[in-house]
Amino acid sequence: MKIFDDLFKRIEKHNGTRSSALLAQAMASACSDRYTVSLASVCAVLDSQSKEVFDRLVRIAQEPDFSNADQDRALDKLRALGFID
């Protein structure tokens, strides 16, 4: 999914920042109800551009290229990068 590709690029570009970790957690939450993200942190940490991406994650199933298989792949990559268990 394009949104995941864009997010992984953003996370890798800003690796080690609180916003990257928060976006990674938000991506995991968009893929599985096993993961959660704090809305207070979203408001306090993310800049306006990242909040727009977060807003798209909230409506992930409406993305034109939505795919459950891509969600599974995103979770695998987040695990490999150490963002989730």
Image (cartoon, grey):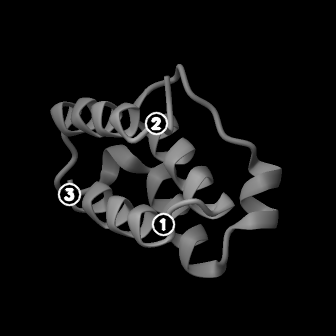
Judge from the rendering whether residue 48 lies leftward or rightward of residue 53; answer left or right: right
Residue 46 place in picture, x, y as percent: 68, 68
Element marked by disc 1:
helix
| Mark seen at residue 26 | none
Residue 36 place in picture, x, y as percent: 63, 32
| Mark seen at residue 82 | 2
- In this orientation, which residue lies closer to the viewer: 60 or 10? 10
Element marked by disc 2:
loop
How far is disc 1 from disc 3 in space, using C-alphas?
A: 15 Å
| Mark seen at residue 64 | 3
What residue is at 25 percent from the left and 60 percent from the top?
5
Amino acid type at image mark 1? Val
Sequence-wise, the earlier of marks 3 and 2 is 3
Q: Quadrant of residue 80?
A: top left
What residue is at 22 percent from the left and 35 percent from the top?
73
- Please determine whether, in this image, residue 26 is positioned above or below residue 54: above
Mark 3 or 2: in front is 2
> Dot 1: within a 10 Å radius of its alpha carbon, few (fewer than 14), some, or many (20 or more) residues?
some
Sequence-wise, the earlier of marks 1 and 3 is 1
How far is disc 3 from disc 2 in space, using C-alphas?
A: 28 Å
How far is disc 2 from disc 1 in space, using C-alphas?
A: 21 Å
Residue 16 place in picture, x, y as percent: 58, 59
Sequence-wise, the earlier of marks 2 and 1 is 1
Amino acid type at image mark 3? Pro
The number of discs equals 3
Q: Which residue is mark 1?
A: 53
- Please determine whether, in this image, residue 73 is positioned above or below residue 33: below
> Dot 2: within a 10 Å radius of its alpha carbon, few (fewer than 14), some, or many (20 or more) residues?
few
What residue is at 33 percent from the left and 67 percent from the top?
9
Amino acid type at image mark 2? Gly
